[in-house]
Amino acid sequence: MKKLPKLTIKKEVQKQKLVTVIGTNYIEQIVPGLLEKSFDIYQKKDFSKKNFQVSVHENTYSTSAIVLAVLGIEAYRNRIYYLEKKKVSKSVSSDISTIFTNKDNNFPKQDFEAILTEVFVIRDVIVHNHIYELEVVSDDNWDMISHKQKLLEGYGDDRKYKNFVNSRVRKTINLGLGVQPGKIGFEDLFEVLIIFDLFIGIANKLLQSNYVPFRFMKKLNGQWEDSLSKYLAYFYNQIPNKKYKFSLKKHLLVVKGKFEKFLPDCCDYFLNSCCTKCKEFGFHQPNNITKCDTCGFEIRLLP
Ligand SMILES: [Zn+2]
């Protein structure tokens, strides 16, 4: 009998190389939900009243979202440095600004390092739970008349806190982010996300496209929105606190002046999505609406 040839099945082994960068998922999956929850409470506030701190709920949603967003920036730094075969340093702000400057000599390294450092200062204040002693004076209605506060010794004595915080108003100097933990709310989170959006934009222009793979997707009023900038514009146009909007704009215009040219022309980022008539932010809105809520100027595509 003829012997049949023995069949051998060659097993193919699949090998995949993975880099573990988990921190970037929080912004895509959790932070937008926290922003919505914090905005829900924030927008119902009576802005004519003085309050020492924001409500516990607004504070909890906002501070956790800030921590997760900043974690994302750090995770991207790690990914970029891995791909560039470089060793990370202790300072995320310095590493990111250095790599951007390596790609473009004209990049304002110190200015970018300064604003990123402020974002890390607010993260530290939350994560290390800065402790203050407070004295709040209220009237019969429990409306605040005045307050005194003291940051306890041992907190805020590092170099970046000292260099980037105005200790009289307890805000960071370039972005005006609050550093009193009980006062951190929607307004601070919103600005941190604009800086995050700027970071993504600059990375997309100066680095290879796979270095910072940020994919945004969130349902807003029943429709999917895939642009973080348009998503932020939706909130920007509804901010009820005029005083905050005024100071936010002041800070953002300075940041825009320095970094707009390092944003890609092709896509929408919050800082370059401005009204062509009056320069107000929040021009490109969800559902393909291109409209300025301040001066009313609108661009409609032909059907
Ligand atoms: Zn306008």
Image: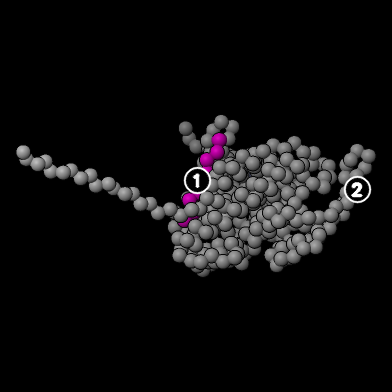
Instruction: Tell which of 106 and 280 is nearer to you.
Output: 106
Residue type for callout 1: Arg
* Residue at far front of view: 1
**Crowd tier of the residue under label 2, counting other residues whose Cα lies within 10 Å: few below 14, some 14–19, many 20 or above:** few
Residue range in magenta is 211-219
Q: Which mark is residue 137?
A: 2
Distance from label 1 to label 2 (Cα)?
47 Å
Give the quadrant of residue 141. Answer: top right
Instruction: Tell which of 120 and 204 is nearer to you.
Output: 120
Give the quadrant of residue 7. Answer: top left
Helix, strand or loop at disc 2? Answer: strand
* Residue at disc 2, CB closer than 8 Å to ligand 1: no
* Residue at far right of view: 140
Q: Residue at x 57, y 55 (%)?
A: 73
Q: Which residue position holds label 1? A: 215
Q: Residue at x 28, y 48 (%)?
A: 12
Pointers 1 and 2 in contact (C-beta within 8 Å) = no
**Crowd tier of the residue under label 1, counting other residues whose Cα lies within 10 Å: few below 14, some 14–19, many 20 or above:** few
The image shows residue 158 at horizontal and vertical percentages of 71, 66
Q: Residue at x 33, y 49 (%)?
A: 14
Q: Which mark is residue 64?
A: none
Residue type for callout 2: Val
Instruction: Tell which of 254 and 119 is nearer to you.
Output: 119
Instruction: Tell which of 228 and 259 is nearer to you.
Output: 228
The image shows residue 220 at horizontal and vertical percentages of 58, 35
